[in-house]
Image (cartoon, grey):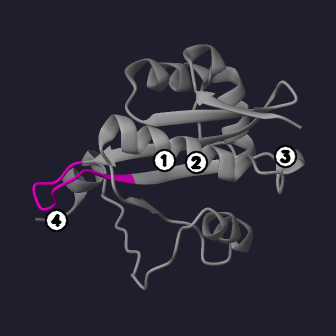
Amino acid sequence: MPIRIRTALPEDAAALCALNAAFNGDTGVTESDVRQSLLTRTEIVLIAEADGEPAGFCCAQVHHSFCYPAPVAEVTEMYVAPAHRRKGCAGAMLAHLERILRDKYNVDEIHLLTGARNLAAQGAYRKAGYSSRNEQYMKKALPSDADSANSPA
């Protein structure tokens, strides 16, 4: 099964929307939203094709900080449809992404976050040469403007 990896185009919006729904469930992201994101290029989006059909996607963003000499990239999403898993699709997407990040963006380090119980993804990342570090993931949900306006000062 030949795997083809390429940068996603606006005409891939329907396929990416369907793959995202399979990955993340109904997030409310529409085909139009995906198309607009691809047009504005706010992130790097790759699509994998196997046997002529969409097989997965990989997204990354490049971050610049005055604290570091080179930009750092983050793999923000990666998904391979179940029928195409364990066939080299994830590794091919990561290798393609790494070439783009190194050659076009001068990135020398890539970060990513995956679930502690997502052993399949961890295995795919390790196979591609990624290693884990002992860091703590933290997050905070920010209240909406309406919530802020209704809270006591």
Q: Secondary structure at mark 3?
A: helix
Task: Kindly indicate whether the residue at mark 2 contacts the one at mark 3 (C-beta within 8 angstroms).
Answer: no
Q: Earlier in the sequence, mark 4 or mark 3?
A: 3
For the residues marked 2 and 4, what is the alpha-carbon distance in whole angstroms? Answer: 51 Å
Percent across and percent down for residue 100 are 45, 38
For the residues marked 4 and 3, what is the alpha-carbon distance in whole angstroms? Answer: 52 Å
Q: Which mark is residue 84?
A: 3
For the residues marked 4 and 1, what is the alpha-carbon distance in whole angstroms? Answer: 48 Å
Residue 81, placed above or below residue 136: above
Q: Is residue 24 visible?
A: no
Q: Secondary structure at mark 4?
A: loop
In what quadrant of the picture does the C terminus appear? bottom left
Mark 3 belongs to which amino acid?
His
Q: Is residue 135 left or right of residue 84?
A: left
Percent across and percent down for residue 38 are 48, 23
Q: Is residue 139 highlighted in magenta?
A: no
Mark 1 belongs to which amino acid?
Glu
Mark 2 belongs to which amino acid?
Ala
- The mark closer to the camera, 3 or 2, is 2
In what quadrant of the picture does the N terminus appear? top right
Q: Earlier in the sequence, mark 4 or mark 1?
A: 1
Question: Which residue is the site of mark 4?
Answer: 152
For the residues marked 3 and 2, what is the alpha-carbon distance in whole angstroms? Answer: 17 Å
Query: Which residues are the magenta region?
Result: 64-73
Q: Is residue 70 highlighted in magenta?
A: yes
Question: Which residue is the site of mark 2?
Answer: 95
Question: Which residue is the site of mark 1?
Answer: 98
For the residues marked 3 and 1, what is the alpha-carbon distance in whole angstroms? Answer: 21 Å
Mark 4 belongs to which amino acid?
Pro
